[in-house]
């Protein structure tokens, strides 16, 4: 009797997983020529990636290219892991997106709150986090208060990161968001808000707490309910459940064991995998749905996530800090935006992730490129920056009409 119940449970699990897969949305695949691209030129992607694999720059990769709402290139390369055994890379595998979490989950969620009138970009950070200290200049002169948009554009004065070892020493092996934010909020600011660009994970961790205070939901819960579920991105989530862990691409080997389905970012790991700066996992196909939603000005297959004007504001350089080259969550033209290459135009926006992930989206040509690798496996010594540019250049130059 017990075995029959166990078999029935397994059947139900597989059935539910099949339903989940069948309900997932995806873009149609066509030959490149159908959307004005050269299939011959796109074939150069193969040699570029294989050269990098030959140098062991990273174990493997998945690339998806789409134009005008249709996929023209979708391919897996190399291996998903080297340690403890060599395993092939599969298109359907789930990647630790690292900082792609910032625009896809956190910035999008904050802008949904802006659209709902629950927050303003000009609200002071200290309205939500009283401990948030201002910049202190010469003669102990206090600077202006940081605003929400300062956090989104990395111009709040917060330093890039925090001392994880020190936090672990004081908080054992974990740290809840509230206690972490109190520590972050009191950190000495590098500059007055709006006067310098310093890419900061701490700003996005702060945004996640602000969202939680307003909604009562974590960034994981809010983004699932308002972004991923409506878009049927069924393989996009924080903290992958046990059933999905085997599909996850391993990252760095920590204490002799690869992180698999466990976030690589140390601060996110301290928070149990749910953080505003990192922690999101996804597949190339789910990310394609999100990218197409952005190209569609906030809508995909009847699900509206953002208004057209909101998408425009997010994906242009924020005027108050034009020197930064940053939009609201997105990278438009900063020192980090090499993933867009040299050929796409000024409308291009995108983001990268420390683990070796990246996406770039070009409204002008209706094209996007999703390039996922696990360059931190096994020892965090992989190289990806140069290849990101080359991949984007190959795709851009394959557009013929």
Image: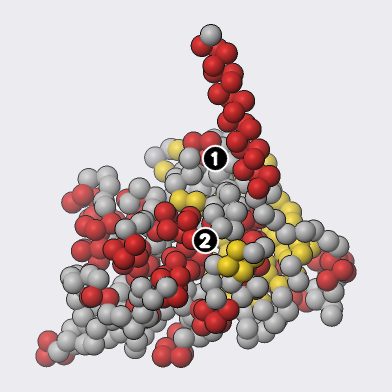
Picture coordinates of residue 176 (x, y %)? 26, 52
Residue behind mark 2: 227
- In this rendered view, identify the residue nearer to me: 84 or 38: 38
Q: Which mark is residue 96?
A: none
Residue 385 in view in this figure: no
Q: Secondary structure at mark 2?
A: helix
Q: CA distance from mark 2 to mark 1?
A: 20 Å
Q: Secondary structure at mark 1?
A: helix
Specify the quadrant that holds the C terminus: bottom right
155 sits left or right of 296 in the view? left
- In this rendered view, identify the residue nearer to me: 342 or 117: 117
CB atoms of marks 2 and 1 within 8 Å = no
- Badge 2 crowding class, 10 Å Cα cut-off, few under 14, some 14 to 19, many 20 or more, is many
Mark 2 or 1: the one toward you? 2
Residue 9 in view in this figure: yes
- In this rendered view, identify the residue nearer to me: 29 or 123: 123
- In this rendered view, identify the residue nearer to me: 315 or 47: 315
Q: Earlier in the sequence, mark 2 or mark 1?
A: 2
Residue behind mark 1: 244
Residue drawn at x 79%, y 58% is 29
Residue drawn at x 73%, y 79% is 365
305 sits left or right of 215 in the view? right
Picture coordinates of residue 34 (x, y %)? 87, 68
Q: In the displayed structure, would residue 196 be above or below residue 127?
A: below
Picture coordinates of residue 303 (x, y %)? 60, 63
Question: What is the residue that sits farthest to the left in this orientation?
Answer: 139
Picture coordinates of residue 393 (x, y %)? 71, 74
Which image quadrant for residue 216? bottom left
Residue drawn at x 34%, y 62% is 215
Residue drawn at x 59%, y 28% is 12
Which image quadrant for residue 136? bottom left
């Amino acid at each position: 009797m017990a075995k029959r119940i166990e078999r029935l449970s397994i059947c139900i699990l597989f059935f539910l997983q099949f339903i989940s897969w069948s309900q997932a949305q995806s873009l149609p695949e066509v030959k490149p020529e159908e959307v004005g691209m050269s299939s011959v030129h796109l074939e150069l992607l193969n040699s570029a990636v294989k050269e990098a694999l030959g140098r062991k720059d990273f174990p493997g990769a998945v690339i998806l290219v789409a134009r005008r709402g249709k996929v023209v290139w979708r391919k897996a390369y190399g291996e998903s892991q080297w340690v403890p055994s060599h395993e092939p890379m599969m298109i359907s595998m789930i990647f630790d997106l690292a900082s792609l979490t910032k625009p896809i989950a956190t910035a999008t969620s904050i802008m949904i709150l802006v659209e709902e009138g629950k927050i303003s970009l000009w609200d002071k950070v200290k309205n939500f986090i009283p401990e948030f200290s201002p910049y202190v200049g010469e003669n102990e002169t206090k600077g202006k208060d940081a605003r929400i948009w300062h956090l989104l554009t990395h111009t709040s004065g917060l330093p890039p990161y925090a001392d994880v070892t020190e936090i672990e020493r004081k908080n054992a092996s974990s740290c809840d968001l509230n206690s972490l934010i109190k520590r972050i909020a009191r950190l000495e600011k590098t500059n007055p808000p709006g006067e310098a660009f310093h890419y900061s994970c701490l700003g996005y961790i702060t945004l996640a707490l602000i969202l939680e205070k307003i909604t009562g939901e974590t960034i994981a819960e809010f983004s699932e309910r308002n972004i991923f579920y409506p878009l049927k991105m069924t393989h996009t989530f924080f903290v992958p459940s046990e059933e999905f862990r085997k599909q996850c691409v391993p990252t760095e080997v920590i204490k002799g064991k690869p992180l698999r389905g466990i976030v690589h970012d140390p601060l996110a790991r301290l928070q149990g995998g749910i953080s505003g700066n990192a922690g999101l996992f996804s597949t190339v196909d789910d990310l394609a749905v999100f990218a197409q939603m952005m190209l569609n000005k906030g809508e995909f297959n009847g699900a509206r996530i953002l208004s057209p004007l909101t998408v425009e504001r997010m994906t242009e350089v924020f005027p108050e800090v034009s020197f930064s080259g940053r939009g609201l969550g997105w990278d438009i033209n900063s020192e980090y935006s090499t993933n867009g290459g040299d050929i796409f135009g000024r409308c291009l926006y995108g983001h990268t992730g420390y683990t070796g992930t990246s996406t770039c989206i070009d409204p002008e040509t209706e094209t996007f490129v999703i390039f996922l690798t696990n360059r931190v496996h096994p020892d965090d010594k992989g190289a990806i920056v140069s290849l990101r540019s080359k991949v984007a250049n190959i795709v851009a130059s394959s557009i013929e009409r």
